[in-house]
Amino acid sequence: MGRRESSRHAGENFLMGRYNPWRDILWETRPHTCVYCRCRLRRRVDLPDSATVEHLRALRHGGESSDGNLALACRRCNELKASHSLLVLERRLADAERLDRPDAKRLRLIVEELRRMEGNGHD
């Protein structure tokens, strides 16, 4: 597979120029809703509610590209979470709420879901 583009994958599953096979696997086996905000996901990659592969625990924090650490997230939530740790996200949430920023609600959903997963022994 790699960088080779086929008609089956053209325009629907290339992220930053690379084919991501996990996206197909997750799309076929998981609900088509964002793990954080629960919005309905689209398969196209160029929209705010496009399905993206989310590492629940970021690679830079010891997470792996494995079924148990991957989920589907909308592009907005995935970009907002980035590879930040829960502690950093909690600080960002406090600042966003204090400043009444528009991203506060989405940050709260991300933090709450990560706390829930951590409490279930996911992390």
Image (cartoon, rainbow, N blue to C red):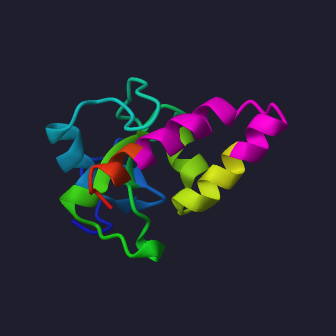
Image point (78%, 34%), residue name: 101
Front residue of this view, candidates 73 and 5: 73
To which quarter of the image does residue 41 belong? top left
Q: Quadrant of the N terminus?
A: bottom left
Q: Position of residue 112 (x, y in %)?
A: 48, 40
Q: For this view, does 29 lie left or right of residue 46?
A: left
Q: Position of residue 114 (x, y in %)?
A: 43, 48
Q: Quadrant of the C terminus?
A: bottom left
**Most prominent secondary structure in the magenta stretch?**
helix
Image point (56%, 39%), residue name: 76
**Which residue ends up furthest to the top in the rendered image?**
40
**Residue 72 to residue 38: above or below:** below
Q: For this view, does 10 lie left or right of residue 31?
A: right
Front residue of this view, candidates 122 and 68: 122
**Residue 7 to residue 50: above or below:** below
Q: Position of residue 37 (x, y in %)?
A: 47, 30
Residue 109 part of the magenta-drawn span: yes
Image point (34%, 34%), residue name: 43
Residue 35: tell me if it is visible. Answer: yes
Residue 46: tell me if it is visible. Answer: no
Q: For this view, does 106 lie left or right of residue 121?
A: right
**Which residue ends up furthest to the left in the rendered image?**
29
**Which residue ends up furthest to the right in the rendered image?**
99
Front residue of this view, candidates 46 and 29: 29
Front residue of this view, candidates 58 and 91: 91
Q: Which residues are magenta?
A: 94-115
